[in-house]
Image: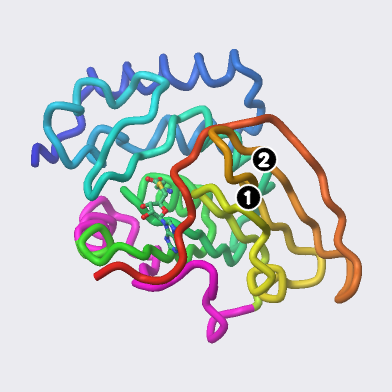
């Protein structure tokens, strides 16, 4: 892999940030993180390196995708990330979203169900300087009970329903951002835990994610 980050890449990132801003992203910390994290270094296949700064999703490995930059920015903005937030991410994939959250000074715990992808990404993230991201091989439907509760939980795969165990792993006042739906498109939802028995639900735009599948894959 070509590990360099050049002025040309930086220029392409600036343009990407402007296009994401024009689409309505206004959280300056999200935009700054996106301008900083070298997305082209998450392209495991060299054919896609040139396309890394287009606002589109692309394949990574194991039939999975790195989310479109706009989608990453959208979910990150809905999470209202604060410095020091303890965040659980479901679906590590390339690690790009996890590094955006780490760049925003969150403490990130990320779970991936595909072993090969987990292994590749676990090795890549510290090489890019984000060693504060902790990677786990496991099933996101279970969450990470031994590290709970979390300030925020971000699901980056399409869930047919909201996984009950994830809601249990939120702190009071915490938020879960998740694309919900089993069809072609999903609705982005944000749940805020008001108290142990009260949850606020907000509904946002529609997106297209790969499915959140049960269990681990070796
Ligand atoms: N956040 C990623 C997006 C990856 S796509 C990025 O920035 O690149 C969604 C990922 O969720 C895929 O890698 C898929 O394997 C993973 N996934 C799907 N179901 C899962 C589950 N139950 N637990 C953990 N990961 C899951």
Q: Which mark is residue 178?
A: 1
Report how far apart the C-alphas of labels 1 and 2 lie in the structure: 6 Å
Q: Is residue 131 magenta?
A: yes
Q: Quadrant of the C terminus?
A: bottom left
- Residue 207 drawn at (x, y percent): 58, 32
Which of the two discs, 1 and 2, labels the residue nearer the N terminus? 1
The residue depicted at 34 percent of the width and 40 percent of the height is 65
Q: Identify the coloring.
A: rainbow
For disc 2, the marked residue is 188
Horizontally, is 155 left or right of 9 in the view?
right
The residue depicted at 29 percent of the width and 26 percent of the height is 52
The residue depicted at 25 percent of the width and 23 percent of the height is 9
- Residue 47 drawn at (x, y percent): 13, 27
Q: Quadrant of the N terminus?
A: top left
Horizontally, is 131 left or right of 197 in the view?
left
Q: Crowdedness of circle 2 by 10 Å Cα count: few (<14), some, many (20+)?
A: many
Location of residue 3 by image quarter: top left
Q: Secondary structure at mark 2?
A: strand
Horizontally, is 98 left or right of 41 in the view?
right
Q: From what the image shows, is residue 188 above or below residue 8?
A: below
Q: From what the image shows, is residue 84 above or below residue 188?
A: below
The magenta region covers 120-148
Q: Is residue 33 magenta?
A: no
Q: Are marks 1 and 2 in contact (CB under 8 Å)?
A: yes
Q: From what the image shows, is residue 196 above or below residue 27?
A: below
Location of residue 45 by image quarter: top left
- Please state which of residues 155 and 149 is positioned toward the viewer in this rendering: 155
- Please state which of residues 124 and 11 is positioned toward the viewer in this rendering: 124
């Amino acid at each position: 892999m070509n590990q360099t980050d050049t002025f040309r890449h930086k220029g392409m990132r600036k343009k990407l940030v402007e296009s994401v801003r024009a689409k309505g992203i206004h959280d300056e910390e999200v935009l700054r993180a996106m301008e900083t994290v070298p997305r082209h270094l998450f392209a495991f296949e060299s054919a896609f390196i040139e396309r890394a700064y287009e606002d589109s999703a692309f394949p990574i490995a194991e039939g999975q995708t790195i989310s479109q930059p706009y989608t990453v920015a959208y979910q990150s903005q809905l999470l209202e990330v604060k410095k020091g937030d303890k965040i659980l991410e479901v679906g590590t994939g390339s690690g790009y979203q996890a590094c955006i959250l780490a760049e925003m000074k969150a403490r990130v715990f990320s779970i991936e169900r595909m072993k090969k992808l987990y292994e590749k990404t676990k090795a890549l993230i510290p090489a890019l300087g984000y060693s504060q991201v902790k990677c786990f091989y496991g099933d996101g439907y279970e969450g990470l009970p031994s590290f709970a509760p979390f300030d925020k939980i971000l699901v980056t795969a399409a869930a047919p329903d909201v996984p009950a165990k994830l809601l249990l792993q939120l702190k009071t006042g915490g938020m879960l951002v998740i694309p919900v739906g089993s069809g072609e498109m999903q609705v982005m939802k944000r749940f805020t835990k008001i108290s142990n028995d009260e949850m606020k639900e907000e509904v946002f735009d529609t997106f297209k994610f790969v499915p959140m599948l049960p269990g681990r894959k070796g």
